[in-house]
Image (cartoon, rainbow, N blue to C red):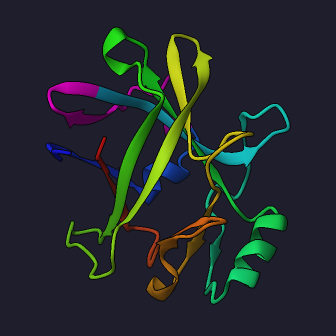
Amino acid sequence: MNILKTVVLSLYVILCVACSDKNSSEEKVLLTESIPVTFSGIVYGELSENGFVNPIYPKIPLMDSIPSALERSTLINRRLSRVIKAYVIKSSMTEYDSLKIRLSMRKEDKTPYDFKPVNFVLYRNGEEDGFYVFQTMTNSKGKPLLFSKNENDIGNFDDAVVLCIKKSTDRFYYDLLE
């Protein structure tokens, strides 16, 4: 479980339509035990009936607060949850069934927030154009994501993963754990 390198994804990049394309020239690299896992693109969307992610807008619907399990389930059912779809270059060194990720947030100046990071899993869900596709949710496993401005809402719950975003200039930091 060595964390050797952290990946920076600014919200600006995530919200940029061109940058969320799997063919984007911007690559994000995660390293663990000298085995590279390269994210060549990330898409935020909703899970379709066939188990794949369809892009949807807004990409990151941000709620002021998600105070309870009942509100979480209501937001999930109102199509305000999202699924992350990450493209990983296909090779014999990236043949994982899942990737355990730790996500933390930092301010624009790279100063970390005081709130806790969240661990969650990306599950491999097939291949597209020479890339493995990893998603936070498939038809059979995983959880949707919700986004809140309130750091007290953060957590990996039974029904969803709740992440906190304070400002549009905040940056996601992904650490590959396994």
In percent of width and height, residue 154 lies at 48, 77
The magenta segment is 18-36
In percent of width and height, residue 125 lies at 61, 28
Q: Quadrant of the C terminus?
A: top left
Q: Quadrant of the N terminus?
A: top left
Q: Is residue 1 left or right of residue 9?
A: left
Q: Is residue 76 left or right of residue 65?
A: right
Residue visible at 44% across and 75% down?
167
Q: Is residue 40 above or below residue 168?
A: above
- Residue 66 is drawn in which quadrant? bottom right
Residue visible at 32% across and 28% down?
37
In percent of width and height, residue 21 lies at 55, 31
Query: How many callouts does the rendering have?
Result: 0
In percent of width and height, residue 140 lies at 71, 40
Q: Is residue 4 above or below residue 169?
A: above
Between 159 and 130, the one lying in front of the other is 159
Magenta run includes residue 35: yes
- Residue 33 is drawn in which quadrant? top left
- Residue 172 visible somewhere in the drawing: no
Q: Is residue 52 above or below residue 13?
A: above
Residue visible at 63% across and 49% down?
83
Q: Is residue 38 above or below residue 166?
A: above
Q: Is residue 95 left or right of residue 145?
A: left
Magenta run includes residue 73: no
- Residue 38 visible somewhere in the drawing: yes
